[in-house]
Amino acid sequence: MLKVGDVLDMGPFQIKLTVKKFTKETLDVEIELGPRSGGTPIHIHPHALETYEVLEGRFDAYVDGIWKTYQAGEKAEVPKGVPHSFRNNSDAKTRVYNTHQPALKMAQYFEGLHKIAHSGVTKNGEVTFKAMLYLSLLMLSFKDEIIPVNPPAPVASVLGFLGKLAGYRI
């Protein structure tokens, strides 16, 4: 179980998470994104509000169909159920303070991502088909926390099912 101060280095994804606060009400992490890091697939949180505050650099957030670049000191908010993603499209690292309210099981989800990042299923930072199976299986395990939009949830469900059939476990 994650605790304050824990660091999850997502290695090939160029994302590092440091836990800043963890209660039932909120999971707060500092996200460090490497230069030109891709971030996350478009997804929703059906039961949680997500916020971002840029601490350093530039941060690109996709919220409800629109990409917007935020600078240090600026904030973005993603209401429950709104499709979103993020990335660092700049040549410098970016640091962002991120919250999920309530925390639900997002910490366990992040631990699963960390496990996948270090399992060898990515190739030069690229998501392979095998990695897609693992990521889909992970999302299926945390439907109250996160639902993929791209790829669509039904596609992710099929991929997750194929991963289960192949014997993959998170």
Image (tube, helix red, strand yellow):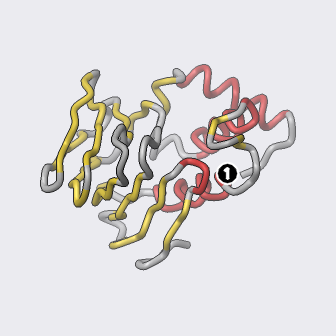
Q: Amino acid at mark 1?
A: Ile
Give SS at disc 1: helix
- Name which quarter of the figure residue 21 lies in: bottom left
- Can you identify the residue that label 1 sits on? 116
Viewer-proximal residue, 38 or 51? 38
Decide if residue 74 is on the left or right side of residue 158: left
Residue at 53% of width from left, 65% of height from top?
A: 8
Decide if residue 50 is on the left or right side of residue 31: left
- Name which quarter of the figure residue 29 lies in: bottom left
Residue at 61% of width from left, 20% of height from top?
A: 155
Residue at 13% of width from left, 50% of height from top?
A: 74
As drawn, 104 above or below 81: below
- Name which quarter of the figure residue 98 lies in: bottom left
As drawn, 7 above or below 91: below
The x and y percentages for residue 56 are 25, 58
Please tell me how crowded label 1 is: few (under 14), some (14-19), or many (20+) other residues with Cα within 10 Å.
Answer: some
As drawn, 110 above or below 152: below
Viewer-proximal residue, 118 or 92? 92
The x and y percentages for residue 120 are 76, 50
The x and y percentages for residue 112 are 61, 55
